[in-house]
Image (spheres, rainbow, N blue to C red):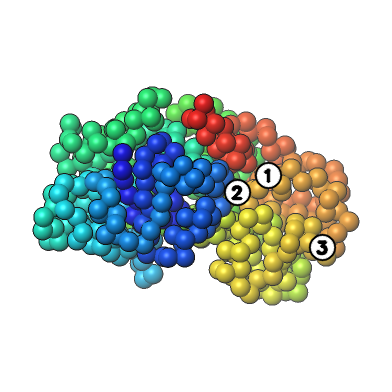
Amino acid sequence: MKMTVIGCGYLGATHAACMAELGHDVLGVDVDAAKTAALAAGETPFFEPGLDDVLRRNIAAGRLRFTTDTAEAARLARVHFLCVGTPQQPTSGAADLTALRTAVRALVGHLRGHHLVVGKSTVPVGTCAELDDEIAALTRDADVELAWNPEFLREGFAVDDTLHPDRIVVGTRQCPGSDAAETLAEVYRVILDEPTPYLTMDRATAELVKVSANAFLATKISFINAISEMCEATGADVTALADAIGHDPRIGRRFLNAGLGFGGGCLPKDIRAFAARADDLGVGSVLGLLREVDEINMRRRDALVALVERACDGSVLGRNIAVLGAAFKPESDDVRDSPALAVAARLSLSGARVSVFDPKAMHNAARAFPTLRYAESAAAAARGAEVVIVATEWAEFVHMPPVELSDLVARRLIVDARRCLDGTAWADAGWDYRVLGSQSVPGPYIRTGAAFGRDKTDATAQNRAGIASLLA
């Protein structure tokens, strides 16, 4: 099937490449000429395990192209996916739909005949209804149906999540049995043959599914971090507690890792936009919980700074501090709302000499926080440090033997902000090991089994395995 993908950022580039991988003829469209040129050359402007291989393979096969010409997109296909960003507004928590509306206007004006426009971006409930009016005002010789098909990608797992999703959600104007739902079932035929649940519903419900899912995950993370504050006050072990309650199938263990909290371009802005939309609809009190979730999450950054200050006898002024991690999570170069960088910046503003290292996010970190110092390796960052902070749980940090840093630092003090290290091993190696989330010292990272943390360190292997199984 011929299709276009409007917007070739993280979501759009991944979706375009993966739709081509399914055998479709795909044209990616973006207003950024430099981005489309890079993608056409097989180069992704961000780090995502496995995506480069999928991109290059399908460009070489002739199934995937990129352009800045929206008119070409309108002529090529009858199915168009909207994958543009919906960031937080600079002056409020609400979502900024400027780019989405601009993309719709640019596309619809060129359409002739029957077309299906499919939104994948995360939007406030009611967006489809508003876009219907704009589309009706812009169309002349076209019959345009608008559907919503939210994405559920995890950075670091995006290829596997696209090719092997746990469900596909489709919201249509007329449900059930709409032409749009049947068309999208054909688009995803290979995936549905696995089989994969295919859930059709009205568009408002589909819009709410994504933000509700993210709000629940954010709530689960903030819940265990709130409990960790109780553990810090009482000496209880939050990791053992999470293991114990995670055995309850109604609760589950994933997303119950206490620590520095969540960041990135999805959870923080989505829960804020969700709460803002509730206010608009006059039911703001219903989602007041999400404001507390956000507050707990931001409080973890304050808690880490306070922990480091206590370790430095009350002040970090003039102290050398190494921060290992800049991305908001491992297997990603995304530094949007990164807890690691936020803490590094706060320590720097308090007078510390901060040196940051991340395996993939150095360029993005330097653009976002140019005044911080950046090192070329974990060892270089730790040289002469009085405190070493593990702020992003990259596998190379998790499995790093303490001896690698022991002779480099000025003081053997390590702060585990993600509760991802084997604290006993570090303590036995002569380090002063301190952990965010409770007073207890956690054992080996792997002991949590299927916990969220270990899953993240296996992202590359899982993505490759998923791609291989699809091609087999």
Where does the image place residue 259, in percent across and percent down from the top left?
A: 60, 49
Task: Residue type at mark 3: give it.
Answer: Arg
Q: State left or right for residue 458 relative to residue 122.
A: right
Position above or below: 410 against 181: below
Q: Which of disc 1 and disc 2 is earlier in sequence?
A: 2
Residue neighbourhood size for the residue with mark 1, other residues' Cα within 10 Å, grouped as few (<14), some (14–19), many (≥20):
some
Residue neighbourhood size for the residue with mark 3, other residues' Cα within 10 Å, grouped as few (<14), some (14–19), many (≥20):
many
| Whether residue 121 can be seen here | no
Q: Which of disc 1 and disc 3 is earlier in sequence?
A: 3
* Residue 330: assigned label: 2
Q: Which residue is mark 1?
A: 395
| Whether residue 138 can be seen here | yes
Where does the image place residue 230, in percent across and percent down from the top left?
A: 57, 47
* Residue 107: assigned label: none
Secondary structure of the residue carrying numbered label 1: helix
Position above or below: 18 against 472: below
The residue drawn where x is 52% and y is 26% is 472
The residue drawn where x is 52% and y is 34% is 467
Q: Which residue is mark 3?
A: 383
The residue drawn where x is 12% and y is 61% is 137
Q: CA distance from mark 3 to mark 2?
A: 23 Å
For the N terminus, the image quarter is: top left
- 464, 392: nearer the viewer: 464
Secondary structure of the residue carrying numbered label 2: loop
- 408, 466: nearer the viewer: 466
Task: Residue type at mark 2: give it.
Answer: Pro
Q: CA distance from mark 3 to mark 1?
A: 20 Å
Number of residue marks: 3
